[in-house]
Amino acid sequence: MQTLQTLPKTMRAVRCYAPEDYRLEEIAVPSPGPGEVLIRLEACGICASDVKCFAGAPLFWGDETRKGFVQTPVTAGHELIGRVAALGEGASEKYGLQLGDRAISEQIVPCGACRYCRTGRYWLCTVHDIYGFHTATHGGMADYMLFPARALNYKVPDDLPVEKAALIEPLACSMHAVERAHIEFGDTVVIAGVGPLGLGMIACARLKNPGTLIAIDTNEERLALARSMGADVTLNPVNTDVVKAIRERTEGYGCDVYIEATGHPSGPNQGLQAICKGGNFVEFSVMKEPTTTDWTIIGDTKELNIYGAHLGPGCYPKVIDYLHRGLLKVDGMVTHQLPMEKYLEGFHLVQSGRTSIKVVLSMSMQS
């Protein structure tokens, strides 16, 4: 094992035990085995899915109809960035990483053995170990964490500001959703929900140069940021009939592309009304509860192309490159940086959504 310096024996970690039972604990610093990388964390963002897990959403904890996804106790967090503190045997050669390098790992650690992994669709892995939710892949709300031997790791430029480096994971998810939309020149593109992931979609979709890029949200501050990041039009459903407004802008046809990122159960139905016949509909949201719709609209009425979007496969190297070159406009997305000890304050900020966009926990800040 290669180490940068003598490692401490214990570290701080935000541990998930149950809904609303997250504890800052002192636990042992892990030691990397063959092919593994030990990271000293710089920062970890708080994702909407982290907050839904914290709040007890059935997708994560299960109910009478489904099994829960979370394994406990687990160290939370998957929007992470850090520096290589130790390298297990063979890890440097495998990943091209050296001690002290800044590095990131894709949020999923694929099993490599299931049908999806064997056919190259690793992000659909049956085992589905994701940092911060499974005990095989403890997350980044800690001083140190392990990238397992099966992880997908990348070097990140040293001169990328940490608040932008902490956005790589959500931006990779945003980029994948935009790629799934198959945007063409001249398209009217709607992105509904401009939280951190929707704003990332605005930034990525702007690079596709659609005819008109429309952002929908109920928060005027987020809509203002969406305009600064490339949206041509912003619509607030609190004071605007957004379906009518979209149709008026498209000679009554509706938008060509609709990306649903609201996370609200009513969001998909709004999109199905707003999109044109033969349009491309991308469902991205992690819903806190099931939703229903009229499938006749999808089939007989409009013959829509429906795409799901999950994680950020193949997008990490592109996001790192585009951020480093300044092509992705993300200034203003990180509204709060908090010390790790204030993780509950961070969760509540994201949960309310009133005064924050992206909340990042910093491991170097003092409370």
Image (cartoon, rainbow, N blue to C red):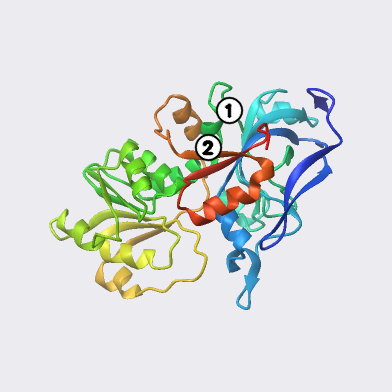
Check disc 1 and report its element: helix, strand or loop: loop
The quadrant holding residue 143 is: top right
Q: Amino acid at mark 2?
A: Ile
Tell me whether circle 1 and circle 2 mark residues in contact (CB < 8 Å): yes
Q: Position of residue 80 (x, y in %)?
A: 62, 39
In-front residue for pair 244/32: 244
Label 2: few (<14), some or many (≥20) within 10 Å?
A: many
Position of residue 78 relative to residue 43, above or below, is below
The residue at the far bottom in this view is 64
The residue at the far front in this view is 367
Q: CA distance from mark 1 to mark 2?
A: 10 Å
Give the mark nearer the N terminus: 1 vs 2. 1
Q: Measuring 67% from the left and 41% from the top, which residue is drawn there? A: 340
Q: Position of residue 349 (x, y in %)?
A: 54, 51
The label shown at residue 168 is 2
Label 1: few (<14), some or many (≥20) within 10 Å?
A: many
